[in-house]
C-alpha cells in the first residue's frame, strides 16, 4: 500500500513539474504501480520457497501484470512488439533459471510434467516445422510486423504456461487469481478514460495517446475493441470466483465493483464475439458455481440486482451509451464486419485445402489472403484492403499450420476443458460459512474446484470470441495463462507414470492426492550438503567443486543467451522507433538496425518513386529510379509472397528500363515480378496496366 501511495505521489509530482503532461496518464501509471505492488505482495501469502523458485515466481507475476498494460506509442507497433519483447526475455530468463536450478539444486525436469506437456511440445515442434517450410521463413520465425504471431511467440507462451504450472502449488491459487484480476485494473482505468471521452463527455478526448486508428469504442492498451472485450471476458470468470469465495466483506465489495466496471467496459467495446463468449462462459460458470451460489443466495441476489441496475442505467442512457453501438451490431449488409469475416473464413478454407499439410507458415495469412479472396468482397473493399488474419483461431491455424495445426489447437481446447471438468468433479466442496470473515475458512479443495469451473468458463469464452477475432500477443497470452493455472489446479490428481505415458489422463484419479507426482517433490532442492571429518570429506568437496563448475558454465551460457535476446529485442524496438519517426534518415537507420524488415525498404522505395515522379526529367531522375528499384528488390527478397511488393518492384523496374531507353533485361525482369503479383492477387486492377506498359516497352525496344 505504501509503495503504491509513494509511486502515485511521484507521478503527480512529475505532472506538477511538467515531466508528465496528462493527468489521466498519472491515474493510468498509478493503476499499474498499484497492480504490481499488490501482485508482488501476494507472494507473502504463498509461503516460503527456494530462492531460484521464488525468482521464477517473481518473473511470472511481473509478466502477468506487465503484458496487459505495456505499449509504446513512440513506435509503429504500439501493442504487440513490446509484449513480444517482454515475453521472449521472460521465457529465456525462465529457461536459464531452470538450467541453473537443475545443476545447483538438483531440480529435475520431471517437475515440468503437468499433463499439458505433450500438446504444448507438439505445438512448438509443429510451429518450428511449418516455420522452416513457410513461404516466408523469416517472417514466420519472428512474426509479421504489427502482429508478431510467429514461432517465437508460441514457444515463449509454452514456456510461460509450463512455468506457471511448475512454479506454484495449489495452495497459491487464491493469490494467483487475485494477481490476474489486479493485472486488468490498468485496462479498466484506461477503458474508463476512453468511455468518458467517447460517451460521457463526447469530444473531450482525455486520452493521453494520439491513436492513429479511428475507433470510437473503448480499447485501452490492446489497440482494438475486439481484443479488449475478448481479454476481459476471459478474465471475468476468475474475478467472479474470487468475489464469491473471498470472506472479507470489503474485498467482496471491491471485487463486485471490479466486475461491474468490467461489464460496462465489455459492453462499450461493442464486440459481438466478446459478448457471445461472455454469455457462453457465464452459463458455464453458473453451472459450475451452482452449489456455492445456493449457499450464498443473499450475496448473489445483491450482485444480480447490481448488474440489473447497471444494464438499466446503460439502456436509459440511450444513444449516449449503447444506442449507436447496438445499431452498428445489426448491420449485416455488404461490406459490414459480418460479410468481411465470411470472406476471410472462405479464403482460409480454400487456403487450407491448397496447403493441407504444412500450411503457408505462421503469420503469413496477411500476404496469402490476396490470392484466395472473394471477388465480390475485393470489389467492395478494394483489392488491396489489408487483412491481418482469418478472424477465426481455428481457420487461422488451418491456413497457417495446415490440418495438423488445426488438430493441435482443437486438441488443446478439448484437452483443457476435459481436464478442467475432471478437476471440478474430483474435488468436493467443503462446508464453510458464506458470511465468515477470514479467507482461511474456505477449504483449499473448494478453491480448486471452483477455480477449475472458472477456468473452463474462461476457456469457453476465449475460444468463442477468438472465433470472430484475430489472434494477438495479448489475447494469446491470457489463453496460455489460463492453461498454466489449469495445470496448477490439477496438481496431485495423477501419478508421474500416467502423465508420462499419455497426455489424455482422464481415468481415475490417484487414491492418495499426496502421492509423489510430477509437479510435487518434498525433497526439493534435492542436493543435500554432506559432511566429513572436518565438515566435508574430500570426495564431497570434489563433488561440490564439479557442481559449482557445472553451475557456473550453465550460468554463463544462460546469461549469454539472455544478453543476446535483449540485444536483438532492443534492435527490433529501436528500429521500429526509427521507422515511426518517418524521415528518410531515420528509416535508413531502421534498415541498419533491423535489415530483415521488408516494410522499411518498401517505405524507402516509395519515397524514391515519389521523388522520381515529381521530376522525371531531372538530371538525377535515372539515379532515383535505380535507387527505388534497389529498395524494392530488398523488399521482394524479404517479402516475396506479397503481391504489393512484387507489383511495386515490377513497376520500378519498368520505370528504370524506360529511363534507360527500354532496357530489355530490366523489362523482362519487370514482367516476371508483375506476373507473380497478378498470380498472388488476381483482383488487383493496377497490375494489368503495368503489365501492358512493360510489354509495349519491350516490343518497342
Image: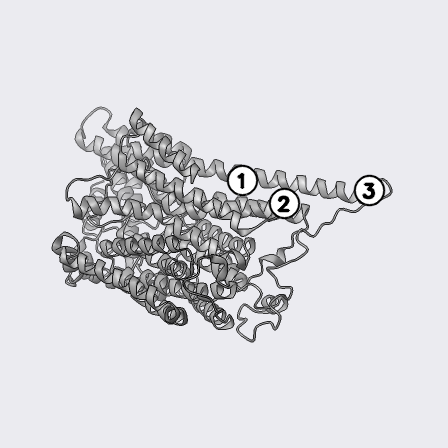
N-term mark: 2 or 1: 2
Residue 481 sits in quarter: bottom left
Give percent across and percent down for residue 602.
30, 39
Residue pointed to by mark 2: 100
Graded by Cα atoms within 10 Å as few (under 14), some (14 to 19) or many (20 or more), the crowding at tag 2 reads: many
Quarter of the figure that contains the C terminus: top left
Pick out the residue farthest to the right: 533
Instruction: Give the mark, 2 or 3, whose residue is nearer the N terminus.
Output: 2
Q: Measure the C-alpha gap from mark 2 to mark 3.
A: 23 Å
Which quarter of the figure has residue 407? bottom left
Residue at figure coordinates x 53%, y 51% from the top left: 46
Q: Report x, y in % for residue 410.
A: 42, 67
- The secondary element bearing badge 3 is classed as loop
Q: Residue placed farthest to the left in the image? A: 319
- State if disc 1 and disc 2 touch (CB < 8 Å): no
What residue is shown with label 3? Answer: 536
- The residue carrying pointer 1 sits among few (fewer than 14), some (14 to 19) or many (20 or more) residues within 10 Å by Cα, namely many
Amino acid at each position: 500500500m505504501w509503495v503504491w501511495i509513494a509511486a502515485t505521489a511521484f507521478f503527480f509530482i512529475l505532472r506538477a513539474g511538467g515531466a508528465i503532461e496528462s493527468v489521466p496518464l498519472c491515474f493510468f501509471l498509478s493503476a499499474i504501480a498499484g497492480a504490481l505492488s499488490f501482485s508482488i505482495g501476494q507472494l507473502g501469502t504463498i509461503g516460503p520457497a527456494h530462492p531460484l523458485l521464488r525468482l521464477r515466481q517473481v518473473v511470472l507475476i511481473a509478466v502477468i501484470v506487465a503484458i496487459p498494460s505495456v505499449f509504446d506509442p513512440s513506435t509503429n507497433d504500439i501493442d504487440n512488439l513490446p509484449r513480444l519483447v517482454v515475453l521472449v526475455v521472460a521465457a529465456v530468463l525462465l529457461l536459464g533459471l531452470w538450467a541453473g536450478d537443475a545443476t545447483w539444486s538438483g531440480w529435475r525436469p520431471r517437475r515440468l510434467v503437468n499433463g499439458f506437456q505433450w500438446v504444448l511440445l507438439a505445438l512448438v515442434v509443429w510451429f518450428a516445422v511449418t516455420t522452416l517450410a513457410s513461404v516466408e521463413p523469416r517472417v514466420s520465425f519472428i512474426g509479421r510486423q504489427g502482429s508478431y504471431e510467429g514461432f517465437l511467440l508460441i514457444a515463449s507462451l509454452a514456456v510461460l504456461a509450463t512455468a506457471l504450472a511448475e512454479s506454484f502449488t495449489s495452495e497459491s491459487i487464491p493469490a494467483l487469481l487475485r494477481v490476474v484480476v489486479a493485472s486488468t485494473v490498468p485496462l479498466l482505468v484506461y477503458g474508463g478514460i476512453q468511455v468518458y471521452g467517447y460517451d460521457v463527455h463526447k469530444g473531450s478526448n482525455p486520452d493521453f495517446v494520439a491513436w492513429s486508428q479511428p475507433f470510437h469504442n473503448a480499447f485501452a492498451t490492446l489497440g482494438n475493441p475486439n481484443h479488449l472485450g475478448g481479454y476481459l471476458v476471459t478474465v471475468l470468470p476468475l474475478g467472479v470466483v474470487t468475489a464469491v469465495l473471498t470472506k472479507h466483506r470489503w474485498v467482496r465489495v471491491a471485487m463486485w465493483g471490479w466486475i461491474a466496471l468490467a461489464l460496462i467496459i465489455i459492453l462499450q467495446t461493442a464486440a459481438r464475439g466478446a459478448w457471445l463468449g461472455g454469455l457462453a462462459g457465464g452459463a458455464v460458470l453458473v453451472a459450475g458455481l451452482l452449489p456455492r451460489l445456493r449457499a450464498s443466495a443473499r450475496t448473489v441476489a445483491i450482485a444480480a440486482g447490481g448488474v440489473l441496475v447497471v444494464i438499466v442505467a446503460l439502456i436509459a442512457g440511450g444513444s449516449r451509451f449503447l444506442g449507436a453501438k447496438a445499431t452498428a451490431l445489426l448491420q449485416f449488409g455488404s461490406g459490414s464486419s459480418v460479410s468481411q469475416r465470411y470472406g476471410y473464413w472462405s479464403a482460409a478454407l480454400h487456403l487450407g485445402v491448397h496447403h493441407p499439410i504444412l500450411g503457408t507458415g505462421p503469420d503469413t495469412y496477411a500476404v496469402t489472403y490476396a490470392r484466395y479472396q472473394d471477388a465480390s468482397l475485393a470489389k467492395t473493399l478494394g483489392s488491396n484492403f489489408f487483412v491481418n488474419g482469418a478472424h477465426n483461431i481455428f481457420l487461422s491455424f488451418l491456413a497457417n499450420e495446415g490440418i495438423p495445426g488445426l488438430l493441435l489447437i482443437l486438441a488443446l481446447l478439448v484437452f483443457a476443458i476435459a481436464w478442467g471438468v475432471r478437476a471440478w468433479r474430483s474435488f468436493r466442496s467443503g462446508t464453510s460459512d458464506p458470511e465468515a470473515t477470514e479467507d482461511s475458512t474456505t477449504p483449499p479443495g473448494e478453491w480448486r474446484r471452483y477455480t477449475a469451473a472458472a477456468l473452463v468458463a474462461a476457456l469457453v469464452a476465449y475460444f468463442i470470441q477468438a472465433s470472430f477475432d484475430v489472434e494477438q500477443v495479448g489475447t494469446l497470452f491470457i489463453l496460455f495463462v489460463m492453461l498454466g493455472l489449469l495445470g496448477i489446479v490439477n496438481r496431485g490428481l495423477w501419478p508421474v507414470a500416467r502423465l508420462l505415458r499419455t497426455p489424455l489422463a482422464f481415468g481415475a484419479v490417484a487414491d492418495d492426492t499426496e502421492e509423489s507426482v510430477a509437479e510435487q517433490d518434498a525433497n526439493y532442492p534435492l542436493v543435500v550438503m554432506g559432511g566429513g571429518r572436518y565438515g566435508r570429506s574430500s570426495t564431497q568437496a570434489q563433488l561440490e567443486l564439479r557442481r559449482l563448475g557445472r553451475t557456473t558454465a550453465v550460468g554463463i551460457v544462460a546469461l549469454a543467451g539472455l544478453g543476446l535476446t535483449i540485444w536483438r529485442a532492443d534492435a527490433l524496438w529501436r528500429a521500429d522507433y526509427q521507422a515511426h519517426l518517418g524521415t528518410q534518415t531515420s528509416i535508413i537507420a531502421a534498415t541498419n538496425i533491423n535489415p530483415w524488415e521488408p516494410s522499411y525498404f518498401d517505405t524507402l522505395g516509395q519515397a524514391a518513386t515519389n521523388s522520381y515522379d515529381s521530376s522525371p526529367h531531372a538530371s538525377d531522375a535515372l539515379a532515383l529510379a535505380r535507387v527505388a528499384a534497389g529498395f524494392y528488390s530488398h523488399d521482394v527478397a524479404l517479402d516475396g509472397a506479397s503481391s504489393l511488393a512484387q507489383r511495386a518492384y515490377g513497376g520500378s523496374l519498368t520505370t528504370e528500363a524506360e529511363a534507360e531507353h527500354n532496357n530489355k533485361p530490366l523489362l523482362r525482369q519487370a514482367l516476371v515480378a508483375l506476373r507473380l503479383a497478378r498470380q498472388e492477387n488476381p483482383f488487383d486492377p493496377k497490375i494489368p496496366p503495368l503489365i501492358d506498359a512493360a510489354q509495349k516497352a519491350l516490343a518497342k525496344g
